[in-house]
Structure formats: structure tokens, C-alpha cells
Image (cartoon, helix red, strand yellow):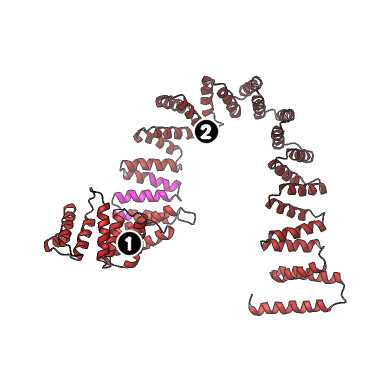
Amino acid sequence: MRLKEVLAVLVILASNTTYIVHAADEDKQERFQYLFLESVRQQEKGNYAGAFDLLKECEAIDSTSAEVNYMLSRYYYNLKDAQASRSYIEKASRFAPDNAYYKGLLANHALQNKEYDKAIAIYEQMYEQDHERGDVLEIITELARRTEKYDKAIWALDKLEILEGKTENRSMMKYHLFIAQKQDDKALAELSTLSGKYPYDLNYKVIMGDFYMTHEQEDKALKIYHDVLQQEPDNITGQMSLFQYYANNNDSINKQRLLNQMLLNKNITSETRVYLVRMALEDFAKEEKDSTEIIEFFQSLLQHPQEDQTLKTLYALYLESINIPHDTIAPILTEILEKEPNEASIRVRLIEYAWENKDFQKIIDLCIPARQYNPDELAFYYYQGIANFQLGKQDAVIEILQQGISTINEGSNPEIVSDFYAFLGDTYEQKGMKEEAYAAYDSCLQWKPDNIGCLNNYAYYLSVENRELDKAEQMSFKTIIKEPNNPTYLDTYAWILFQQGRYEDAKKYIDKTLAAVDSTDNDATLYDHAGDIYAKNGDITKAVEFWEKALQMQYSKLVARKIKKRTYIKK
């Protein structure tokens, strides 16, 4: 709103106020109604400050108005003044005791302050005012259950059943509430009623068996489990309960037999199957069974038709855990991938195996379909790019990485995106596309400012071109702070100092580089740099030694000339 418009509004309000103040003979109620309606009008126009001021005037005239107190409560709520908001809604509810909406807001305040008893009391008042409020009874049930007021929760459930009838969920909730109260007779009666109402749902019979099991009536429990499994052999709930019975009684033979049945049960979820296999492996470890027996256990199960690839995946993971050669595991993973081609984790594992074997074409062959099934997974673009890089296909690297960039969004992993751009920058640099390389490095550092690999390469390539040396020095310094004994980073920093003409400082850091470098390192560039730095510091004898060492590692006409002329020659 412009200043003139603000002033105009203030003039209007001032004139209205003047009119109201001077209208001493007007009826008080008419003044209240006028101000209240005007506040509503100002609010609709978006003039919330003016509306608020008018409401405060209304409050001064009639502080018992439920509507005014309610509206002021909402204003203070939006102003983040919870205490004032609550105070006004309490007044609104007190002055309009039949208004359920006000009570609901008051209950919300109590819940926000974790005053659960007060909230329950408010919801009870709401129910007493309207016995058709099933939603209120559900809230009371949940709050009472959370606060362990089991009698109150059962009371609310009873009212709900009168209002809306019995349901499976409500009966089960009452069952658990009775159990929590240790009212076993009532719990069993509730369960019996439920089982009788739903005779074809055998899970309720299993729960009854579990009830007897926990109450040391194993004979009754065992009979129920057998009856259930006789009627429904694949009832996984019954199988799990019977399995627990065998475990409790150390019946390893029946336990193993039932475990095999459960693992092949078509009704079992993948999560339960994983849980059972892990439990079996723990038992095998306790029994000190060797890997041959465990492999036979898996293979016997895999001879049966599988609903999904969970068991086969667990088998492959187990083989990895006992260090079976990857050449043996790879065919299993390949079979899984044929059935579930969108399973990214399996494909990544196969890519890792191919990397170990330096089978870069295999990596490419795995990544191409992966990008169809998992188009937003940057890792597959990255792996394919690396494989092409290893094969010397730089154009293919750039193409695939640019395709990957199109999938980057705000939800992408910054670590992966950063490495992605760094790799792209390195590839551009190798092709002599320097501006594109630097743009990629800048993008990399936007996603992860402390990507030290990128910082080092970016800084070094700038120094080689003898451009933006201050920027290069700052980036390189970050890398040696992070890894002070990394010879590659130390060498970069020494060379930048050399390019800046800071020869003494450069010598300090090239000495640190030489102290940190491995004796088997064959980096000719490092020793060439050392020779140049020592030459500029006046120690030509030592410089020649370094150049000769560099020449032994990799022939260079320039280095040979330096040795011959015993002087530094700028490239």
C-alpha cells in the first residue's frame, strides 16, 4: 500500500472515530454493531491492523461478546502470541458455552501445551452437548489411551459402539485396553465375541491362542494353532505363533520345519521373510553350523517357485558376507536383475564387480538400461561416464554427463551432484575446453563448496595458465588445510606460490610435498616443479637432481633442455 493510500485510510478511520465519539446520544449497542461490522469490512479489504483496532474498541464497549473474543483470539494466534490467543478463546467459550467450534479451538490449545487431561475434559463437554459426535468420542479414546486412562478410553468406545455399532478395530482396541488393565476375563470375552462375529477370519482365533500362551495355558494355545492351520495351512499368523511355541520349548526340529514352510508361504511379506531369514542365521550361528549347511538351507528353499526375489537377494548377500568369489555371486545377481530390472541396488553391486575386473564395457551395458528404469538416479550416469572415460571416449563422457545434468533438481544429493560437475570439468579440461571446464567447476563448488578434489584441480589448472592466481591460491589453501599431508595438494599449492613469484614460500611447500610423497611415486611433474622452485631459489645443483629424476620417470624435451643449460626455462 502506498503512503498516500495509508494516509487516506487513516483519515477515513479518524473521521469515523470522530463521528462515533461525538455521537454521544447513539445507543451503545448500535455503536458496537457499527464498529464490529466495520472491523469485518476492513478485514475483508486486507486492512488487518485497522480491523484489529476496531475490535479492541468493540472489546472496550462489550468485553463479554463471544464473537469479538473469538476474532481477537485468531489475531493473536497469527501474531504468535499463544497465551493471549488462548485467553481470548477461553473467554469466547465461556460467553458462548454452546458453541462447539470455540470449544474445539480451546481443546487444540490444550493439546498444543500437552494438557491432555484438560483436552479430554473439553471434548467430554462437547460430547455431552451433542451425543451424535462420534468424531469427538474417537479423539477421547485416543487421548485416554495415550495417557493410560483406560477406563475413560473404554467408556468412549462403548459410546461409539452404541452410536455407530461394533467394528473389528474397536473390539480389538477394547481387547488390548482390557489386557492393559489386567482384566483378563473381559479381554477374553471381547475376543470371543469378535471371533464369533467373524468366524472366517482365523486370525482372531490365533490371537486367542496367543492369549492362552501368555497365560501359561499352552495346551489350549497349541490346540487352537493346530485347528487354525488345519483349516488354513498357509495362515502366516498361525504359523508365526506356532513357531514361537516351538522356540519357547526348544523344539528345533519342528521349528526348522515350520521355518521352511513360512519362508515359502505365498502370503508372507518381504519384510517378514527378511526377518525370518535373519533370525534363522542367528540360530545357525548359535548352533555353530558351518557355511556349507547354511548354503544348503538357502538352495533347498530356492528350488521352490518364488513369489519375489527376496530370498535370492538374501542368499547373495550371505555369500558376500562369507567372502565367496564375486564371479560366483554375479550370476545370481544377474538372475535377480532379469526378474526385477528396476532394482537399482542389485545393478550397483554388479557395476562394482565389473569395476573390480576393469570390465568397463560391462559397466556401460549395465548403465544403459538402468537409466531407463531409474532415470533420476544420477549414479548410473556417473558410472557410465567413468567407464567411457577409462575407454578414452571423452566425447561420450561429456554427452552422458550432460544428459545426467538434465535430471538434477533441488532434491538431488549435493555430494553426488558436486562430484558429477567435478568429473565433467576434468573431462572438459582434458579436451582443452577450458572455459567449459571452469564453468563446470564453479557449478561443482556451488553444490559443495568444500569439494577438495575439485578445488585442487581447479586451482592447479588456473595456475598452469597463470590466471586468477589469487583465486587459485585461496582454493588450494583450503585443500591443504583439509589434508595437510596430501602430496598432490601440497604440490599444487607450492606451484601456485611459484607462479605468484613467492619462491621462498614455494620452496617450503615443495619440501613438505617431497617429505609426504611415497617413495614409489612416479609423478614426473612433481619433481619437475621441485627443480624449477629450487632453481629460482638459487640452488641449481639440487634443481638439476630433481629434473634428472623427473626425466627418468617421463621424457620431456623441456626438462632435458633445463638439465643441459642448468637453468630454469619457462614453458
Say what amino acid the circle numbered 2 marks: Tyr
Q: Nearer the viewer, residue 321 or 261?
A: 321
Question: Residue at (77%, 56%) from the top-left corner?
Answer: 102
Question: Residue at (46%, 39%) from the top-left corner?
Answer: 340
User: Mark 1, mark 2: which one is toward the viewer?
Assistant: 1
Say what amino acid the circle numbered 1 marks: Ala
Residue 276: numbered disc: none
Dominant secondary structure (helix, strand or loop) of the stretch shown in magenta: helix
| The N terminus, quarter of image | bottom right
- The mark tally for this picture is 2
Name the element at disc 2: helix
Q: Position of residue 19 (x, y in %)?
A: 80, 78
Q: Nearer the viewer, residue 565 or 369?
A: 565
Q: Nearer the viewer, residue 259 or 340?
A: 259
The furthest residue to the left = 564
Q: In this view of the protein, can residue 571 be seen by the observer?
A: no
Magenta span of residues:
366-395
> 10 Å neighbourhood of mark 1: few (<14), some, or many (≥20)?
many
Q: Position of residue 220 (x, y in %)?
A: 66, 21
- In the depicted structure, whether residue 70 falls above or below residue 346: below
| Sequence-earlier tag: 1 or 2 | 2
Quadrant housing residue 57:
bottom right
Question: Residue at (76%, 48%) from the top-left corner?
Answer: 123
Q: CA distance from mark 1 to mark 2?
A: 51 Å
- In the depicted structure, whether residue 539 falls above or below residue 351: below
Residue 459: numbered disc: 1
Q: Position of residue 425 (x, y in %)?
A: 35, 58
The residue where tag 2 is placed is 275
Q: In this view of the protein, can residue 128 be seen by the observer?
A: yes
Quadrant housing residue 438:
bottom left
Q: Nearer the viewer, residue 380 or 56?
A: 56
Q: Position of residue 338 (x, y in %)?
A: 43, 38
